[in-house]
Image: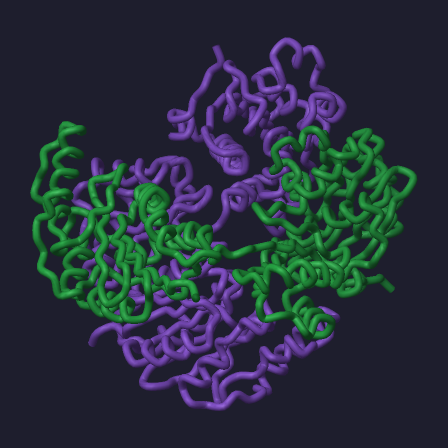
Chain colours: A purple, B green
Amino acid sequence: MSAPKVQLLLTGNELMTGDIVDSNSAMMAQVLKDIGLGVSRKVTVADDLTLLVNEITYMTSTSDILIINGGLGPTVDDLTAQALALAIGEELTQHPQALAHLTNWCRQRGAELNGPNLKQAILPKDCQIVANKNGSAVGFSVRYNNCDIYCTPGVPHELKTMLIEQIIPTISANLPIGLIADVTRLQVFGLGESSLQKIINEQLPQWPTAIDLGFRAGMPLLEVKLTTDTDEGLALKIIWQEKLASVLGDHLIAEIKDKPKSLAEHLLNQLQQHNLQVTTAESCTGGLIASKLTEISGSSMNFEAGFVTYSNKMKTAMLDVPTDLFEQYGAVSEQVVVAMAKGSLVKSNADLTIAVSGVAGPNGGTKEKPVGTVWFAWGSIDDIKTQCLLLPYKRVKFQQFVAAIGLDLLRRYQQNLTATPNYITEHSFSEQ
Amino acid sequence: MSAPKVQLLLTGNELMTGDIVDSNSAMMAQVLKDIGLGVSRKVTVADDLTLLVNEITYMTSTSDILIINGGLGPTVDDLTAQALALAIGEELTQHPQALAHLTNWCRQRGAELNGPNLKQAILPKDCQIVANKNGSAVGFSVRYNNCDIYCTPGVPHELKTMLIEQIIPTISANLPIGLIADVTRLQVFGLGESSLQKIINEQLPQWPTAIDLGFRAGMPLLEVKLTTDTDEGLALKIIWQEKLASVLGDHLIAEIKDKPKSLAEHLLNQLQQHNLQVTTAESCTGGLIASKLTEISGSSMNFEAGFVTYSNKMKTAMLDVPTDLFEQYGAVSEQVVVAMAKGSLVKSNADLTIAVSGVAGPNGGTKEKPVGTVWFAWGSIDDIKTQCLLLPYKRVKFQQFVAAIGLDLLRRYQQNLTATPNYITEHSFSEQ
């Protein structure tokens, strides 16, 4: 029995103008791949009724599953329900379940259920509602022309939750047995995609074809996905996953079957196990490391305070950094980050700290300390480590990478890992 | 005379698996927009000869310009030339100009012109070559069925150079005069898409059809885009943009013709004009407001320090918040945020501050202070304003929204805006 044919239809003027890059369809393809389904064709059109009706008509005649994304919003340019009704020859009616969702949604937010919102309950007659936990727009599905059509919201996190929690399980339940794939993700930090590919080519040249190897470059974590849907693959996977893990070494953060975690979450889980407090002293990242930690629910157990000391004056006022260090070594120096690290530990009484000071650019670079230079100091009060790196990225990406490295250095410190990570080998920098 | 209809056809297995996100089509749309052309439809298919031939046949019959991207490489799965030849009924021959390019390309790199490379010179008979400065794959174009077809390489920088230096000038030279569209963006904060649509429906019901109105919901800013490509539209736009601006009131952050700015950047621009220093005292946002400010290059002129005081103990240690306030009112209270705000001004010597303390959840809510409750305190040392809101969002979205509101409250304070913003009307919350 062959797998069902899946097509995607994306709608939205903003997708046609180039104002946004479509990441939804890649996400949909990945989630579908997890249950063994490929996407054969995708079409993107502007918010235009005639175009939409034509596409829906043609696509339902050439696929078994059609996922339509976007056009569920309250504004006049959102046309999915109307186009679908025309294409399948159903009238539009107010759907009681959609109305209940909207009423409830507005009540919870103390907002009035207005005309534009009410439009979101006007759907093709007899469609099935697909709940939206995170937004006002419900999804809906119909079966037409032997094709299952799912209409989904364009907002990425609404789409993702709806897909994973509802649409995929429904599709999956109707799949022929044996199509469900086994997926494991290896979360990696500090190795780029091409370095990783090279390592695998060189060290694991016999990688078995029964295990599909996929890469997904995230910022900052890279995900290596092992997928197999055969018994042979499942048997081989036990050995080859172990081989891969050993090749990745300390760059491997976790091997997971379910939801990926951030670097901050991995670190906080460790700190929680050992009941340790962490603090931050940030100059060039300006609070980003602290905010990554506090994104995680329960972080208050292991994080009490962070110091954003952007100017020299405030490094002294908040962290007691001696003023003569600035004159003698400059703000971006080993001496200053060490003083920041120690100051943060003394002021917060935490067990561990990470301090960073660097030149985020685009201005402020010198010949000795070019844009991208950054000093790290981390550890505990009687054991502070330091490192200088040169990270050739633009301001915001530089800040994100510095924050990620800071969290990874703490993870390595806390786990007593002594191998030199790839980002240090690659970006080591010492001023002359 | 109407604008030519443009469609895009993208080919590549890697585009269908979700392993890469397609950024080429957004770039192509933007470059085309610069000469006033919109893209009405784009189709993405795997490297499959039948699919490609079908798409090319249909797309040339429904557009004036078709740009095909990808499938020009040397490997067997690169099928664009073959598919195009089949679709237009021409044979494939070795093209002398393409061969010369390849020979030259290989000689310059000291490489041998091998079989796979030679394949790149086998093109539909009588096609025009489009030079590729940056890669081995030449582009080519044919006119068929009253449609200009351009085949371009999938590698982003090769595509971009070829488009900007060759294809766009060719298309542009054939365009009717006066087609270049006029685009203005209005950046809005504090009004949702549906509220905004309602306001426009009610207060500007006569909105002229000559001005296209587009919405783009960002987090946190909403963008309203006014586009027109007619003389009538241009004349009307002056009046109607003003009417829209007046309806948006203080929710309008800026009217821009070029690159959008973040809330933090708008605020920093104002502070720079008045030479004012700002500081932050963050509990539930954990450094996010400070990091938004320091994302902006040059922020060090107006931002010296931020205080991330996540625990009560550190609110006292870093900002001198009196301990009895916690017992009497709790950490999420007007009294505590005011003390945080004042403490941050005293400790940093800044002119303005924003302090936040809230329940980010998912745990820690009580009946009186449910998850989503947040107190803001902002202003200068002798004029501190306060507000309590209830923002029913999940942790990370809650933190982002709180940070955005914090920055907007400072913008309003600094500009002496006194009208109540929509987010206060909508989410006002007072504990009982």
Can you say whether A114 is above or below A155 in the image? below
Q: Nearer the viewer, residue A108 or A118?
A: A118
The picture quadrant where one finds residue B65 is: bottom left
Quadrant of the rendering where the N terminus of chain B is positioned: bottom left
* Residue A5 sits above or below residue B304 on the image: below
Q: Indicate the position of residue A127 as horizontal and vertical percent values.
A: 48, 85
Relative to residue B46, is residue A80 depicted above or below? Answer: below
Is residue A71 placed above or below B397 in the rendered structure? below
Residue at image x 52%, y 18%? A369
Q: Indicate left or right for B398 with B155 as reference.
A: right
Of the pair B168 and B411, the residue shown nearer to us: B168
The spot of residue A301 in percent (x, y) is 65, 45
How many labels were placed on the picture? 0
Q: Residue at x 76, y 40 (%)?
A: B281
| Residue A235 coordinates in the image, percent (x, y) | 22, 56
Taking the image as drawn, is residue A244 in sight?
Answer: yes
In which quadrant of the rendered image does the C terminus of chain B lie? bottom right
Instruction: Using the rendered image of the protein, determine whether residue A20 is visible from the camera's viewpoint.
Output: no
Q: Is residue A260 left or right of residue A29?
A: right
User: Is B185 left or right of B416, judged from the image as shown?
Assistant: left
The residue located at (30%, 63%) in the rendering is A181
Q: Is residue A175 left or right of residue B74?
A: right
Picture coordinates of residue B388, whole percent (x, y): 81, 56
- Residue at 26% in and 58% down: B149
